[in-house]
Image (spheres, rainbow, N blue to C red):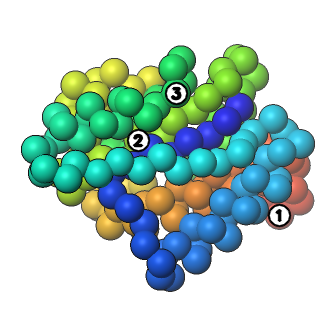
Amino acid sequence: MRVHICAVGRMRAGPEKVLFDDYQTRFDRTGRGLGLGPLSVLEVEDKKSLGMGAEATLLERVVPKGAVICALDERGTVMSSPKFANTLGGWRDAGRSDLAFIIGGADGIDPELRARADAKLSFGSMVWPHMLARVMLAEQLYRAASILSGSPYHRV
């Protein structure tokens, strides 16, 4: 199952990018034998600043057809890492070929796009900087792949 992060905004060089790239590499390496990955990033930018609706239109254009859509949203479900791993494995085992995580812009995800998501994931009730949320997601994807691979470190 290919995994995509569809996000508003561009990640520039800096510490967040270094961390993201590291976890992306780890996920791709660990997930390959499990039928997970590769992890790609599809970035969009609302250059005219038309708001959440315009961002949603841009995001919808980059989400692969038929993908499971998981919106990152503070109103979403808070999951443990093992539960997240099992959810990921369940989508893979159901034969889904693509999984798209949606990260909105500064104002969040358009309510209509959020309502169409198959799942909503929260990293807690606090709002995180968008680039840091990408790093946190990449780390959790790597951790999920490690859990699914039976890594002794991640046994529960």
What's under tag 2, amino acid-wise?
Ile
Residue 139, horizontal then vertical, whole percent: 61, 61
Tell me the residue at 35%/37% (across/down).
Answer: 59
Residue 80, horizontal then vertical, whole percent: 57, 49
Tell me the residue at 65%/48% (across/down).
Answer: 39
Tell me the residue at 12%/51% (across/down).
Answer: 49
Mark nearer the viewer, 1 or 3: 3
What's under tag 3, amino acid-wise?
Pro
The residue wearing badge 2 is: 102
Residue 104 vs residue 153, the one in the foreground:
104
Among numbered discs 1 and 2, the one appearing first in the sequence: 2
In this rendering, the answer to whether 137 lies above or below 23 is above
What is the C-alpha distance between the residues marked 1 and 3? 33 Å
Residue 31 vs residue 83, the one in the foreground:
31
In this rendering, the answer to whether 98 lies above or below 80 is above
Q: Is residue 76 left or right of residue 54?
A: right
In what element is the residue under mark 2?
strand
Mark nearer the viewer, 2 or 3: 3
Q: Name which quarter of the figure residue 97 lies in.
A: top right
Mark 2 residue crowding within 10 angstroms, few (<14) / some (14–19) / many (20+): many
Mark 3 residue crowding within 10 angstroms, few (<14) / some (14–19) / many (20+): some
* Marks 1,2: beta carbons within 8 A: no
Mark nearer the viewer, 1 or 2: 2
Per the rendering, the mark at residue 64 is 3
Residue 154 vs residue 54, the one in the foreground:
54
What is the C-alpha distance between the residues marked 1 and 2? 29 Å
The residue wearing badge 1 is: 153
Residue at the farthest bottom position:
15
In what element is the residue under mark 1?
helix
